[in-house]
Image (cartoon, rainbow, N blue to C red):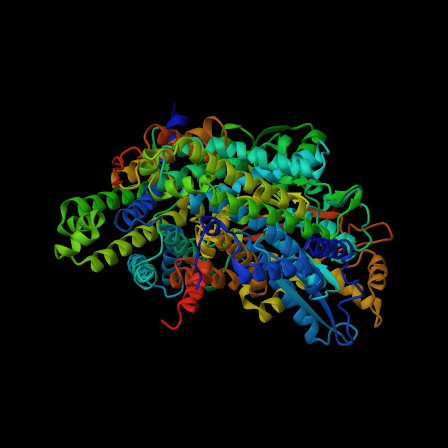
Amino acid sequence: MALLAQYVVGGLAVGSLYALVALGIVLLYRTSRILNFAHGDLATFGTFVAFALITAARWSFGVSVVVSLVVTAVVGAAFFFLIIRPAKEATLLGKIVITLGLALFLQGATTVLWGTDTKTMPFPLSDTRVYRLGEVVVSQISLGSFAVGLILMAGMYVLVQRTRIGLAMRAVSQHTVAAQVLGIPVRQIFALTWGLASALGAAAGILLAPVTLLDPYMMLDPFLKGFAAAVLGGIDSMPGAAAGGLLLGVVEALFGAYVSVKFKTTLAFVIIIAVLAVRPEGLLGREYKRRV
Amino acid sequence: MELRQRYEEDLYLVRGALGWTALLAFAALLVLLPYLAPGYFLYTASLIAAHVVIAVGLNLLVGYTGQISLGHAGFVALGAYTAGILAARLHLPWPVAMAAGGVVAAFFGFLVGIPALRLTGPYLTIATLGFGIAVNQVLTNWDALSGGRSGLFLPKLAVAGVRLRDHHIYYLFAALAAALVWVAFNLARSHIGRAFVAIRDSDIAAEVMGVNLTVYKTLAFAVSAFYAGIGGAMLAYLLGFLEPQMFTLFESIYYFSMIVVGGLGTIPGSILGAVVLTILPQQLAGLKQYLPLVYGATIVFVMAVEPWGLYGRWLKVKLWFKTWPF
Amino acid sequence: MKLARIGVFATVLVLVATATVAQTQERGITDTEIVIGSSQPLSGPAAFWGQGVGGGMAAYLQWINDQGGINGRKIRLVLRDDSYLPPRAVANVRELVERERIFALVSLIGSANTFAVRDYVIENQVLWITPTADANMWAGFRNKKYLFVTYPGYVDEGRILTSYAAKNEGAKSFAVFYQNDLYGQKGLLGIKRGIAETKTKLAVAVPYEVTDRDLSGHALKLRQSGADAVILYATPTQGALIVREMAKIGYSPKLFSSFTLADPIMFQLAGDAWNGIILTAYYPVPGSDPKVDAMLETLLKINPQLRASPFNALAGVSFIEPFIEGLRRAGRNVTRDGVVQAMESLRNWNGDVIRGVTFGADRRQGINKIYIIKSENRQYRKLTDWIEYPVGF
């Protein structure tokens, strides 16, 4: 029983990070209808910026993190304005390939700037200090990332559902031209969305790095899982992204524990496909109504 | 000016004296390649042929039918490993092994097409992505079948006991690719191709007009998987060695970018994309760690400047010249 | 019209049937330089290995060239990136042999890539120095005339490590954490043989994929097995991660590992959890031998970026050192067969990094010994002398 709880706790901890990644992906998809395959590499880039600021420039942790989030947000928004927007005519698939190209470019840039060796990310919370809840062991970092993840998710919810800016974001995602007609500054909203999504990714990366160690390819797996979680939860639903991430983390941990470690990822996807077969719009997604 | 006077003229693949000249010149180039190019380029040329087959097949699914597939490396792997296992374990001759590779992949394509009937857009992407990963993991861990990470060695290609040399392999692959491309062209022009395009443009409207979605969507997956399987078998024989890590999400993305950069929805586009995206990393291999930077930037640049892909740009250039001086 | 068509078809057929390629001649040697080549993963997830090994080789050759080269010739290394993908590795090797016309191919990281290029290299009689893959794969392979390997066999290494652990450290049951590829699988095979030899137990074998970053489940499984010793066949990232996870859940077995984790980077990545681990090594590790330390300093002076992967850089030097010695012994008149003969004359030869290299007329496995080290206070201490294993080829 304690072992089961341990696995579940581990799954929740990693699931909260999947949820964070998924949140960024969903946010972008809702507004721009683009699947951003560069999300993981943007996050890695941001994390490396934080790392460089902390170790090379010797700034404090808080300042470095804030600056790196801002930098990533700027890079994300710049990418949108300089490349995606001018490519208006591009089909959806074309835009996806552009993000793929950007992902490759960022990977190369990260490797050239910071090298390929693995590094440790300095973090105020320790990975080895553990708390015991009964027989279950939780590390300080797991608790911290889970808490931060929850806070960020709650913050996003409040932002999108309860503020005027969030209202504007929702309007733009439903019908861009109508939103423009109503006087909503669509370009600023897009900039905000891309920046916010990129910053969320970077936050996930910074939370992940002390646990997974920092190297240019650390987000490959989490990005994939985050993407799958986003789809599982419904790619246009932010609560869905959160739910999907947590669920995926737990399911994966339990399957890896009790059935097979080797096929962990396969099973995660099989479950997702099964859910999609029953509910094609994801767990919490809205049913997709189209005009013919 | 080009006047079409009969319906048949609209269906011609190659039009007019200019078209035939271009085609024959291209064919001549292909035939004479071993004499014009250095030996090591023949290997790349054979690799291009295999990639062309895969890209054309993927294009039939993504470009013509509008179904996104990010797990195509799974079909390629299935074709490659079927051919490999039949050749290495059962010692079947290569035509049989290759054909079997295509058929097995087509069968799995059909299976994947079934859930695809209910899914669209990002949901279908995830489903196909999951399929690709599942194939990779099964091949990695089912040692008895696939040789796992130790890999699978294939016997060399031979005709009547005589081992084929580089240039023979090149001719064989080029001929195979040409034949499959010709079939794809004809498929696109036929009622099946029209059904595919109808599904892409609006599947509900297509169904209303009598296009059986179940049949045509699964057919699209099956045909596309067949091409991928044949391409995979070609890769297997070319390399002589198979390992599951050769067929990951990275490869799926690679094939995907080929068809989009080349020109989505057009067969010459996918051929062009396959050629360019195979040669480009090879030529850039000397750049070492700067390779992803240049390669990624190139893809972004091409797609940003010309959303219709390389072939789209070529069409625009042709159109400009045709309508000159207006 | 029909006749013309038949004529064209016949011409094409004749062309196809008689197409030939240019013959290869002795390549890579001019009056002033010797050209050698390598295909390494310089980008992609395996870039850490390729940049370390490739960078180490390049820096070492630059040092040699700065001292005047070998018998009046400078050595030029052509490095190509294959991103750890077999099709690219094959294309790179072909291009290196046919376009760059290299005299010898050095290293090539990864068993998959090695398998893919193997037939081409052997058939074209290209001198191949230390393909960086499991050495045991060459046992029983024919046509090894131009192949020289100074790299340990994972199976032998696993067996020796397990035997040592059982006999000298009192380990009774083993849990193995291994990378799910040829490297880890061969290691596991060696461990199983060691277990059979010492009549101990294999409690569990937990594999991981290179992209795995969440190892909490793996650590739990290792703990569940109740083993008193854990053997790692991993790369630095996952090696550090699993050791930290095990410390987190309060599992502290005796730790053993293969030589790939002997890089000092582990002290930084795994921190205190890395204290007391016992590893193998096949050349003296930095900090334990003046010649190795001097070589490391030289490399770092030429390329300071190698600071991030000192072990890999030295490994690169260890691959290429015997070949340089062979070139020296071959004299001014360098031919492929001449170098082969020169290398066959190496008997228990010590380079700056690699030690005890022996080749012979039918011996292509240059080193057949490893030794055991232990990590203490961020340094490695030698525990045993050289332990030999049977020469396989």
Give the image location of residue A246, x and y in percent.
Answer: 33, 36
Image position of C187 with respect to A185: above or below: above
Q: Is residue B237 left or right of residue C218?
A: right
Q: Is residue A30 left or right of residue B132?
A: left
- The residue most toward the top is A1
Foreground: C34 or C199?
C34
Image position of C63 with respect to B145: above or below: below
Give the image location of residue B217, x and y in percent.
Answer: 42, 35
Foreground: B246 or C250?
B246
Give the image location of residue C136, x and y in percent.
Answer: 73, 43
* Residue C30 visible within the image: yes
Task: Find residue A60 and report its image quarter.
Answer: bottom left
Foreground: C219 or B79?
B79
Give the image location of residue A31, x and y in percent.
Answer: 25, 50
Image position of C285 with respect to C71: above or below: above
Residue at (27, 47) in percent of width and height: A27
Q: Is residue B155 left or right of residue A121?
A: right
Quadrant (top left, top right, bottom left, bottom right) of the N terminus of chain B: bottom left
Quadrant (top left, top right, bottom left, bottom right) of the C terminus of chain B: bottom left
* Residue C280 visible within the image: no
